[in-house]
Image (cartoon, rainbow, N blue to C red):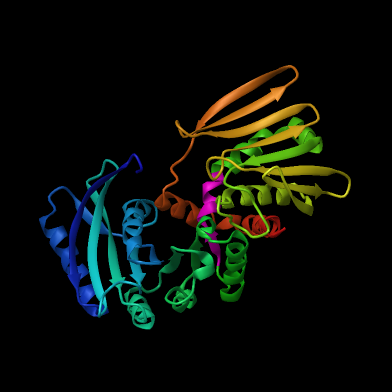
Amino acid sequence: MAQDVTALERLEEHAIAVDARAIEDEFARIWNETASVNEEGAAVRVRVMNLVAAGADASDVERFESVMQTLPQRHPCRGVFAVAGAPHEALAATISAHCWRTGTAKRHVCSEEVILSGAPGQERQVASAVLGLLVPDLAVALWVMGDPASADGLASRLFDACDSLIVDSARAASLSGGYRAIARLAEDHDVPCLDLTWARLAPWRALIAQLFDGDAGARELEQMREIAITGGGPLSSKGASAEGASSEAALLGGWLASRLGFALADVASADGGVSAALYDGTRSVRMRFVPGASPLDGVTIRTSDAHFAVERHVDSRHIHVREMWDSGATRRIVEQPADDEGSLIALTLDGLGELATYREALAVAASLVSG
């Protein structure tokens, strides 16, 4: 939670008929009553976007509510969770509101939540209810909470209403299938596709880039010989394996190769992992993927005269950055930023300018996991 934001309370939570007008009237009543009894300061009803979460099943409600505890602090919004897999005979709705105290001023910033649930087969009715609840003239971000390759049914009825699509490639049952689905969704619906796994990699990408700043860093890049990425299970031509291949590892490899201007020449199994040959026309670099204990344990880059490493310390949640030269070594420790889904969604919405870089990394990652 931001230092200048203090959680206050959930103002109200109750079931209500699935009727857009009735829900709007109920929210208006809540805010009017809040303003009339609030003695500490003004309650500001702020909405700069709509967040629609298409749940895979009813158990995703908790994930949605957790996101709504953090996301509105950076992107005030109306949040609508929708699922058509709940054990109800008819559509059901629950509404609630949250407020936060911001800064030193006596001001409360508030946001709204609506949870819509229907039985299997009621996708059309649930989607219609969602569309009726969107705040007009505000951007709509659609969060597909399950496997990107399974974004059909309810989610597919909402694609044309969204301005951006949020997915998580780490939730794909098959990495190759998940990557293809993400690329296809972006192309078919002409919408930015934002990947939470890409957001998880933000601190890694920044720290790796910093290692090669300046003229000395550029010279080391010219002398690069090997890249080793440790994390998840072994990558394979079948995508995610029983050991759990890591989208973080594949996307980081895709980012490194695409940013350095390397083309992927071949991919082969090696020592329980994968080895890939990269070429830029004049030299080759070996990229190895090594199974690890977490989705991404670390990356090591070897040049002719140095050894660079960025590694996660699991217990402390810190990232260790090391440079090792013949003349000595340096080391620093960086705190890993928050990686809960609310923080990651905020980061993806802030990073729309990285879309071209992500697409290039995704294309290489798709080649890596498909062999």
- Who is closer to the viewer here, 13 or 45? 13
Residue at the extreme top: 327
Residue range (magenta): 192-202
The front one of 162 and 167 is: 167
Is residue 117 shown left or right of residue 168?
Answer: left
* Quadrant of the rendering where the N terminus is positioned: top left
Above or below residue 269? Residue 33 is: below
Residue at screen point 58% across, 61% down: 174
Residue 248 belongs to the span the image colors magenta: no
The x, y position of residue 87, in whole percent, is 28, 73
Task: Look at 50% across and 61% down and name the residue there.
Answer: 167
Residue at left offset 28%, top offset 67%: 114
Q: Quadrant of residue 11?
A: bottom left
Residue 336's place in the image compared with 91, above or below, is above
Q: Position of residue 357 (x, y in %)?
A: 65, 55
Quadrant of residue 138 within the rendered picture:
bottom left
Residue 46 spot, x, y in % from top left: 31, 60
